């Protein structure tokens, strides 16, 4: 017989490293044709970070994302980056890029101010133009200003910056401190169906609400949440490393190390909870690793709701779930038959 159940998993997760220095650096150059070149040490591993970082630079410079050429992960040319790890890229590297773009933009303002007959602090960068605040008709194209900065004023519009999140070391006596600059939060709800004759668990649906600060690119945020849930489904139900008595792994390939496929994925509803963080670039924090943290807890709580058993060690394979059901049935047959 199949039983349905629902379960909730909640989590909080820090952005970046604990206490230790966690810097990123960036260089932004505005070109004479109105485009910009961004140099960053960040590695793109499929999470879409270079798109987001290009968006941050474009927003600060008042140009389009398609106008930004991103050069990444070339140690001969790009500045230092701690790494695409610890869910830190949008927050830490993004802050460095925003600061670098702001410095390049301020050079444009200094050059454009006498050309427009105003002070630099009266200017803004919008719609590929340097314009007077409140008077968009009084404006110059970014490319024209960058060309004049390079060939007229002799001050090329290039900005470089680094960012290291402020932290406070942990007190060895009390354990108190501020090891991370910011945190993200999430709740996931899973609905499962459990067959009490085979122990098979099918995840029907997962609803995931994730706080990531400002969503710089909502589509990428949603994709990362879906990807994290797929990993969480594998961790909860399928992925298991098996060893023999000599400590040798007996399933070292994808033939018998089972991972979720598209057929194993549930229906997923993603709710992006925007929560502006004043310390992040345009209020952003991050969403990477936290997307997988709550999934297993939600699924295993749903299994308990469905058949009343706990599987204390992951993954909760069919064999383990069935063994737990049988153990409970033997201990209290009336309660199991009524569930």
Image (cartoon, helix red, strand yellow):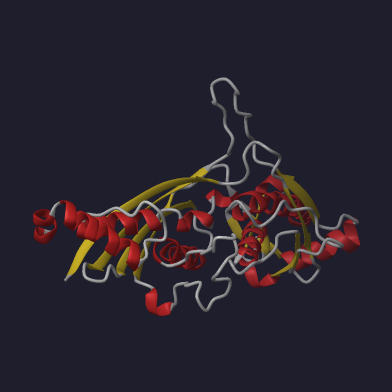
> Depth check: 103 or 172 in front?
172
269 w.r.t. 264: above or below = above
How many numbered discs sit on the rendered protein? 0
Quarter that holds the C terminus: bottom left
| Image side of residue 152 versus residue 337, left or right | right
When asked about the image quadrant of residue 32, the answer is bottom right
Residue 188 seen: no
192 w.r.t. 275: above or below = below
When asked about the image quadrant of residue 33, the answer is bottom right
| Image side of residue 245 versus residue 61, left or right | left
Quarter that holds the N terminus: bottom left
Residue 60: horizontal and vertical position, in percent?
A: 65, 56
Residue 2: horizontal and vertical position, in percent?
A: 19, 70
Looking at this rendering, what residue extends furthest in the front direction? Answer: 245
> Depth check: 174 or 64 in front?
174
Identify the residue at image location x=66%, y=66%.
Answer: 44
Residue 114: horizontal and vertical position, in percent?
A: 79, 52
Residue 256: horizontal and vertical position, in percent?
A: 50, 75
Identify the residue at image location x=21%, y=67%.
Answer: 196
Residue 231 seen: yes
> Depth check: 191 or 60 in front?
191
Identify the residue at image location x=14%, y=52%.
Answer: 332
164 w.r.t. 325: above or below = above
| Image side of residue 271 versus residue 17, left or right | left
């Amino acid at each position: 017989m199949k039983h349905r159940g629902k379960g909730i998993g909640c989590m909080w997760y820090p952005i970046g490293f604990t206490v230790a220095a966690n810097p990123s650096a960036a260089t932004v150059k505005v070109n004479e044709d109105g485009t910009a070149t961004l140099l960053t040490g960040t590695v793109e591993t499929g999470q879409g970070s270079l798109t987001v970082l290009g968006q941050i630079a474009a927003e600060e410079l008042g140009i389009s994302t398609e106008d930004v050429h991103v050069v990444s992960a070339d140690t001969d040319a790009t500045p230092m980056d701690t790494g695409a790890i610890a869910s830190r890229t949008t927050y830490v590297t993004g802050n460095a890029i925003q600061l670098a773009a702001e410095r390049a933009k301020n050079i444009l303002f200094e050059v454009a101010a006498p050309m427009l007959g105003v002070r630099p602090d009266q200017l803004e960068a919008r719609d590929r133009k340097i314009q007077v605040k409140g008077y968009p008709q009084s404006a110059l194209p970014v490319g024209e200003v960058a060309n004049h900065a390079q060939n007229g004023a002799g001050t090329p519009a290039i900005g470089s910056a680094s960012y290291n999140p402020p932290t406070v070391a942990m007190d060895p006596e009390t354990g108190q401190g501020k090891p991370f600059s910011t945190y993200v939060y999430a709740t996931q709800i899973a609905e499962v169906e459990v067959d009490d004759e085979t122990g098979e668990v099918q995840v029907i649906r997962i609803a995931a609400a994730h706080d990531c600060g400002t969503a710089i690119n909502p589509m990428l945020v949603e994709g990362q949440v879906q990807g994290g849930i797929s990993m969480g489904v594998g961790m909860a139900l399928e992925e298991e490393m098996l060893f023999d008595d000599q400590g040798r792994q007996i399933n070292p390939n994808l033939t018998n190390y089972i991972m979720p496929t598209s057929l194993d994925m549930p229906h997923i509803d993603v709710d992006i909870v925007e929560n502006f963080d004043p310390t992040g670039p345009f209020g952003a924090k991050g969403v990477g690793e936290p997307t997988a943290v709550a999934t297993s807890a939600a699924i295993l709580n749903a299994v308990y709701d469905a058949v009343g058993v706990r599987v204390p060690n992951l993954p909760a394979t069919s064999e383990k779930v069935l063994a737990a059901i049988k153990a409970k049935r033997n201990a209290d047959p009336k309660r199991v038959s009524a569930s």
